[in-house]
Image (cartoon, grey):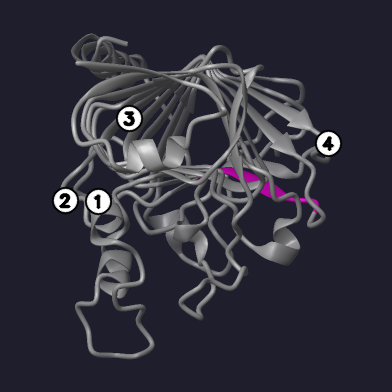
Amino acid sequence: MKILHLSQRDDIAHILDNLDEPATIYLAEGTYRAKIWIKADGVKLIGAGRETTKITFDDAAKKPHADGREYNTFRTYTLCVTGSDCVLENLTVENSNAHPEKVGQCVALSVNANNFVAKNVDLKSTQDTLFTSPFPDDLVVRYSGLTDDPAYYDGFIPKEQLCLEGSAVQIYKNCRIYGSVDFIFGCAEAYFDNCRLISVADARNSGYVAAPAHSLKQDRGYTFLNCSFESDGAPEGAIYLARPWRDFGKCDFIDCSLGSHISPLLFNKWNDTYRDKTCRFSYCGLTSDAPLEPVAWSKELNARQRQEILSRYALLEKQLKV
């Protein structure tokens, strides 16, 4: 396996864009202003520490792109991963935009890949911090150029970033993820283990941590294990743990601690929709600063269901060597 040691003097975006084989890449301390796409399989990107090694950029959804259209959510990433079996460790990935109500969505990390692991990583942004593909089916149609309708964005997103067939497994361990609205979204089977989910201030004075869009055929969605939901300026009672971005979105929250910024209702159905009838939101073992009154359409996991999830996660941890 190739081993590279890079510093701020190196063009890391160019190096990673042209990498075509597995590699372990060590990033020295420093702030790297770059928009990066990891295409190769088996890449490990390891920083000197998440307090000292930062990759940052500032694209936003309403920013005009060179092609004459706006960036849209999915082109705003600071770091995009499409290679399978990749690892991020001991670094920070940031989208530095701070006013999503004005500039739109600002993705820090977009993981359009399978068997992805992030350990001791900080992800920082506001709205839509972390995207976990695959895309919902309707967006694959919309962006892939499958139609002749000019209202659809033919070729809008590179095919390598868009068309991920089947399901994807991702694990985030000992990470800190910052955001305000829908700051973890997508369709992956993703596990957040011992992570801190930090809701930052937003001028709209409300927010949502997760926005899952899993299809009905997916048995597993987002699972939050032993996570801490914390506030960095978010108002008391104004943040929901999740709302379904598409019908059948799935989230499980197990043995998590909730700050007073989390609504006692826990979940929201997504505006004027009927997704409260289709989404699959469950919880157990939650501790909170305030009494909880979970919405009637959520479910409390029983001991058997809890153990099935934990056993599945333990198997994936072993397989991915987390």
Identity, as a three-letter code, of the amino acid under mark 4: Gly
Q: Which mark is residue 170?
A: 3
Q: Earlier in the sequence, mark 2 or mark 4?
A: 2
Q: Earlier in the sequence, mark 2 or mark 1?
A: 2
Q: Which mark is residue 165?
A: 2
Q: Between tags 4 and 1, which lies in front?
A: 4
Identity, as a three-letter code, of the amino acid under mark 2: Glu
Q: Earlier in the sequence, mark 4 or mark 1?
A: 1
Q: Earlier in the sequence, mark 3 or mark 1?
A: 3
How far across and down, in percent of the image, does residue 302 sit? Answer: 37, 20
Using a 10 Å C-alpha cutoff, classify the residue at mark 2 as few (fewer than 14 neighbours), some (14 to 19) or many (20 or more): few
Q: In the rendered image, which quarter is residue 22 located in? A: top left
* Residue 157 relative to residue 259: left or right: left
Q: Earlier in the sequence, mark 3 or mark 4?
A: 3
Q: Please report the residue visible at 65 percent of the width from the left and 17 percent of the height from the top.
A: 52
Q: Which mark is residue 216?
A: 1
Q: Which mark is residue 233?
A: 4
Q: Please report the residue visible at 53 percent of the width from the left and 50 percent of the height from the top.
A: 243
